Image (cartoon, rainbow, N blue to C red):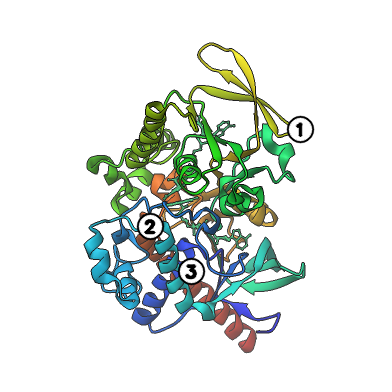
C-alpha cells in the first residue's frame, strides 16, 4: 500500500461497532456485486474488547443473541452460535442455560470474528486527526494522520470515514494530579493496575473503589474473590447500590425500532426519554451482583471479621498522596461530617466520557454542524464537505441509550453501510462526470 493509496473507507477503531460494520459491508458487497475498499485502524496492538477489565467473574450484560449480526441476519457465519460451534462448545454452552456468556468468552468471540477480517485491519496505529484535502474549495477526500508504537506519524487517504473510538475514562478533577501515581488508576486499566500493586503476592492492602456502577461492583467482587489480602471499600455518592432495570418492558428501549422513535422526537423530548431510562445503564449494577456483594457483607457480620465495606452517601472532597498511601477526605452527604481515611490504592470506577471524536474531527470543525448526525449517523456538514463522516457510539443524545452499547450493532452497521454505498456511488459518479467533461473540453 503506497502513501497515496486512496481507500473508500477508513474506520477509526476496530471494536464491536466497526467489526459489525465490516460484516455488514461484506454482506452489502455480495448483494451489490461491488466491494468497498475498507481499512480499519486500531491503536491496540491486537484485538481486545475492554481487555484490561476482563476479570474472571464478569458477564456480558446483554443476550448473546444480540451479537454482531444475528438481529439482522441470523444465518450469518459471524454469529455467536457459529463461534460456539467452531470452538466445539455449542452443546456445553446450551447446558449452561444462560443468555449471558462471560466477558472473557465474548472477547474471544469478537477476536475470532476480527481474525476473519485481518486483511482489512491495521493494529498498533492511533489516529490523531482527520484533515480535509481541499480541491477547489471542495473536500472529496480526507487525510488521516496516525502514529504507531514507535512514535512515527503517517498519513492515509480516504473517501469516507467512520469513527468508532468508544468511550474514554472519566477521571474526576480531584484525581487528575494522580496521573503518574500507579496507586490510583481508572477501572479501564484494572488488571494492569492490580498487577502493579503487589497484593497479588499477598501484601495486605486497603483499596478504595470510587463509584457505584457495574465497573465498581465488578472490581469489588474481584478484590474479594482474587485478592485475599485486600480490604475493599466501595465509596459511593448515592444512598445505595441500585439495580440495573433490565425488566422486559423496559428492555424494549434497546430494540432497533426504538432508535426511530427517539430520533423522531424533539431534542427536549429525546432528553426526557434518556433521563427516564438512565437507570438501565448508568450508575447501576446487575441485581445478581448486588446480591453477591450483600451476601459477602452479611457473612462478615456473622464472623464479626470486617474485611470490606460499602460506604454510601460519601463525597470525596479531597485526595492527597503521601508516602504511606492516598488520603481521601470523605464527606457524609447526609450529615456533612468529614473524615479522612488512608488507602493503599484507589480504583476510579467513575465511568466514561464520549468525546474522542471531537479532537479527531477538529480540523474539519468549520465544515461540520456541531457534530450533529442524521438518522444514518452521518455527520451533518456544509456542501463543501463531500466526503462522508459517520459516527458510531457518539449519538446517544439523538439515537437513544442503545447507542453506546452492543444492542443495535447489526442494524446500525447496515444503516451506515447503505448510506455509505449511496454516498460513494454519488461521489464516484460525480468524479467520472468531471473526468468526461475534462476529456471533452
Ligand atoms: C467494561 C465494559 C463492559 C461492557 N459490557 C457491555 C455489555 O456487556 N453489553 C453492552 O451492550 N455494552 C457493554 N459495554 C459498553 C461498550 O461501549 C460496548 O460494549 C462496545 O464496546 C462498544 O463498541 P465500540 O466499538 O463502539 O467501542 P469500543 O469497544 O470502546 O472500541 C473502540 C476501539 O477504538 C480503538 N481506538 C480508540 N481511539 C482510537 C484512535 N484514536 N485510533 C485508533 N483506534 C482507536 C480502541 O482501541 C478500541 O479498540 C461495556 C463497556 C465497558 C467499559
Ligand atoms: N459486565 C459488563 O458487561 C460491564 C462491566 C462494566 C461496565 N459495563 C458497562 O460500561 C458502562 C459504564 O459503566 P461504569 O460502571 O464504568 O460507569 P457508570 O455506570 O457511568 O458509573 C460511574 C460511577 O462513577 C461515579 N462517579 C462519577 N464521577 C464521580 C465523582 N467525581 N466522584 C464520585 N463518584 C463519581 C458515578 O456516581 P453518581 O452515580 O453519583 O454520578 C457512578 O456511580 C455501562 O454501560 C455498563 O453497563 C458493563
- In this rendered view, identify the residue nearer to me: 426 or 191: 191
**x%, y% of residue 440?**
61, 88
- 204 vs 251, left or right, is right
> Disc 3 and disc 2: Cα gap in Å?
39 Å
Question: In the drawing, what numbered circle is on residue 102?
Answer: 2
Residue 225 x %, y %? 45, 46
Q: Is residue 82 left or right of 388 when viewed as pictured? A: left
Mark positioned earlier in the residue sequence (3 or 2): 2
Instruction: Please name the residue that numbered disc 3 is placed on.
Output: 423
Secondary structure type for disc 2: loop
Q: Which of marks 3 and 1 is nearer the N terminus?
A: 1
Q: Nearer the viewer, residue 140 or 38?
A: 38
Answer yes or no: disc 2 within 8 Å of ligand 2: no
What residue would you read off at disc 1? 322
Of discs 3 and 1, which sits in the foreground?
1
Q: Which of pointers 1 and 2 lies earlier in the amino acid sequence?
A: 2
With respect to residue 7, does 338 lie above or below?
above
Work out whether 195 lies above or below 317: below
Amino acid at each position: 500500500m503506497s502513501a497515496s493509496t486512496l481507500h473508500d473507507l477508513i474506520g477509526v477503531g476496530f471494536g464491536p461497532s466497526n467489526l459489525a460494520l465490516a460484516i455488514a459491508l461484506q454482506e452489502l458487497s455480495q448483494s451489490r456485486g461491488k466491494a468497498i475498499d475498507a481499512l480499519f485502524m486500531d491503536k491496540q496492538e491486537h484485538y481486545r474488547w475492554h481487555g484490561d477489565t476482563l476479570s474472571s467473574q464478569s458477564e456480558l450484560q446483554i443476550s448473546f443473541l444480540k451479537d454482531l449480526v444475528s438481529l439482522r441476519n441470523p444465518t450469518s457465519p459471524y454469529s455467536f452460535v457459529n463461534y460456539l460451534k467452531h470452538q466445539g462448545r455449542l452443546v456445553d454452552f446450551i447446558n449452561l442455560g444462560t443468555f449471558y456468556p462471560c466477558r472473557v468468552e465474548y472477547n474471544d468471540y469478537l477476536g475470532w470474528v476480527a481474525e476473519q477480517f485481518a486483511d482489512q485491519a491495521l493494529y498498533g496505529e492511533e489516529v490523531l486527526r482527520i484533515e480535509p484535502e481541499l480541491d477547489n474549495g471542495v473536500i472529496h477526500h480526507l487525510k488521516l494522520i496516525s502514529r504507531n508504537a514507535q512514535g512515527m506519524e503517517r498519513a492515509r487517504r480516504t473517501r469516507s470515514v467512520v469513527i468508532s473510538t468508544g468511550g474514554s475514562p472519566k477521571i474526576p478533577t480531584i484525581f487528575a494530579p494522580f496521573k503518574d501515581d500507579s496507586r490510583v488508576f481508572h477501572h479501564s486499566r484494572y488488571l494492569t493496575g492490580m498487577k502493579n500493586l503487589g497484593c497479588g503476592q499477598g501484601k495486605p492492602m486497603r483499596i478504595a473503589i470510587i463509584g457505584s456502577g457495574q465497573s465498581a461492583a465488578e472490581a469489588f467482587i474481584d478484590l474479594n474473590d482474587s485478592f485475599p489480602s485486600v480490604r475493599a471499600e466501595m465509596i459511593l455518592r448515592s444512598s445505595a447500590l441500585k439495580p440495573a432495570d433490565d425488566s422486559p418492558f423496559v428492555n424494549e428501549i434497546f430494540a432497533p425500532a426504538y432508535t426511530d422513535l427517539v430520533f423522531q422526537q424533539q431534542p427536549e423530548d429525546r432528553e426526557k426519554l434518556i433521563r427516564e431510562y438512565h437507570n438501565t445503564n448508568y450508575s447501576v449494577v446487575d441485581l445478581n451482583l448486588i446480591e453477591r456483594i450483600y451476601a459477602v457483607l452479611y457473612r462478615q457480620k456473622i464472623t464479626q471479621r470486617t474485611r470490606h465495606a460499602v460506604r454510601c452517601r460519601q463525597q470525596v472532597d479531597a485526595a492527597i498522596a503521601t508516602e504511606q498511601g492516598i488520603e481521601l477526605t470523605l464527606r457524609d452527604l447526609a450529615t456533612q461530617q468529614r473524615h479522612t481515611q488512608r488507602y493503599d490504592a484507589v480504583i476510579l470506577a467513575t465511568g466514561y466520557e464520549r468525546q474522542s471524536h471531537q479532537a479527531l474531527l477538529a480540523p474539519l470543525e468549520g465544515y461540520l454542524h456541531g457534530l450533529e448526525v442524521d438518522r444514518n449517523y452521518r455527520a451533518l456538514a456544509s456542501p463543501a464537505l463531500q466526503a462522508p463522516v459517520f459516527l458510531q457510539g457518539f449519538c446517544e443524545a439523538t439515537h437513544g441509550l442503545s447507542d453506546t452499547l452492543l444492542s443495535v450493532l447489526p442494524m446500525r452497521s447496515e444503516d451506515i453501510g447503505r448510506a455509505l454505498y449511496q454516498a460513494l456511488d454519488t461521489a464516484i459518479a460525480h468524479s467520472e462526470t468531471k473526468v468526461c467533461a475534462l476529456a471533452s473540453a
